[in-house]
Image (spheres, rainbow, N blue to C red):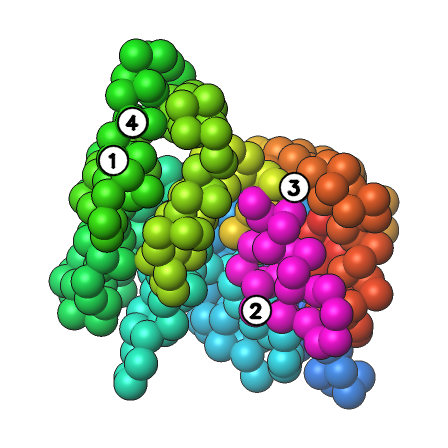
Amino acid sequence: MKDDKQVAWFGGIRGKLSRGELVLAHILANSVFGQQLLGGTDEATIIEILSSRTSNERQQIKQKYKITYGKDLEEVLKSELSGNFEKTALALLDHPSEYAARQLKKAMKGLGTNEAVLIEVLCTRTNKEIIAIKEAYQRLFDRSLESDVKGDTSGSLKKILVSLLQANRDEGDNVDKDLAGQDAKDLYDAGEGRWGTDESTFNEVLAKRNHKQLRATFQAYQVLIGKDIEEAIEAETSGDLQKAYLTLVRSARDLHGYFADCLYKAMKGAGTDEETLIDIIVTQAEVSAFSVSLSLSNSPRPQPESLEILRHSKGQVNLQGIKAKFQEKYQKSLSDMVRSDTSGDFQKLLVALLH
């Protein structure tokens, strides 16, 4: 059967394995196996290929690699790469929903729970993404994500996370000003307007309203109460519940700005939170659907001009928005700050994803 007729399934997405993916699988194999004979691995080519393909295209490269060489590409790279470079490369090879599912599983594994990961993933995803993550979690671990979240969290945090897992947010663009005013009043009555806090009202509004509607509600709250909704949340809640509510508010107001803030905090001051850099840059990096036919079938090495075509084919909408917001808020380039806070092949891969 010809290469372009082979079919595979990737998390429910059916796609043909193109000639380009066959060639790139060959290039990756040569980057590892060929360079092993010379005493090393061609990290530059690995970086170039992983940073210049869409997630679906990377899945096809993995499949073609397995068919052609009888080995899992992830296992090969694990044996050749190390540290944060290895983590980033493997994250890029994972399907986005499966990567998120693995992060959630890791956050709930063993004693203690990393609530920050649960909050970041579940409070910033669309309905479609949450459904895909739930399905991936069930497929990978034969367990219900909702059941595990219920078992590993408690109280009001559990309630808001379970609400989000229902993937029942209105994702339209309509704004009902009367509803915004009523929600603003209800939020006040549930928080600052009473002794204690009625979290069920906050959950209902923050987990179900569309982002434009929420922005109208926040504005109505400011007019009605004379205080920003974030101030009210900070006054009325604490700990992980506060983090969850603030994440929902900030991502509804400006998702690009939210991620820009997270990246800045990960790098400012002494030390760098590499896990946050990997999670955000990898999950937000997506490449425009671009198929290029490389005439490299008889060449063990990639031609620079062919890789240049790949490099300039990228159209990273989400990351471009984050980069622009980062520049606007902090008066510095995200790429430059990543360069100054990271090093080696890890740095090169992150910077390649950002360009």
Say which of 320 and 33 sits in front: 320
Q: Nearer the viewer, residue 162 or 68?
A: 162
Q: Earlier in the sequence, mark 3 or mark 1?
A: 1
The quarter of the displayed image where residue 184 is located: top left
Instruction: Specify the label residue 189 is tagged with.
Output: 1
Residue 199 pos. (x, y %): 23, 47
Residue at figure coordinates x 76%, y 60% from the top left? 338
Q: Residue at x 33, y 19 (%)?
A: 181
In the image, what residue type sits under mark 3?
Ile
Name the residue tied to disc 4.
185
Q: Earlier in the sequence, mark 2 or mark 4?
A: 4
In the shown orientation, is residue 322 left or right of residue 331? left
What residue does disc 2 label? 275
Q: Secondary structure at mark 4?
A: helix
Q: Which mark is in front, 3 or 4?
A: 4
Q: Nearer the viewer, residue 32 or 328?
A: 328
The residues tagged by marks 2 and 4 sit, at their Cα atoms, a distance apart of 39 Å
Q: Amino acid at mark 1?
A: Asp
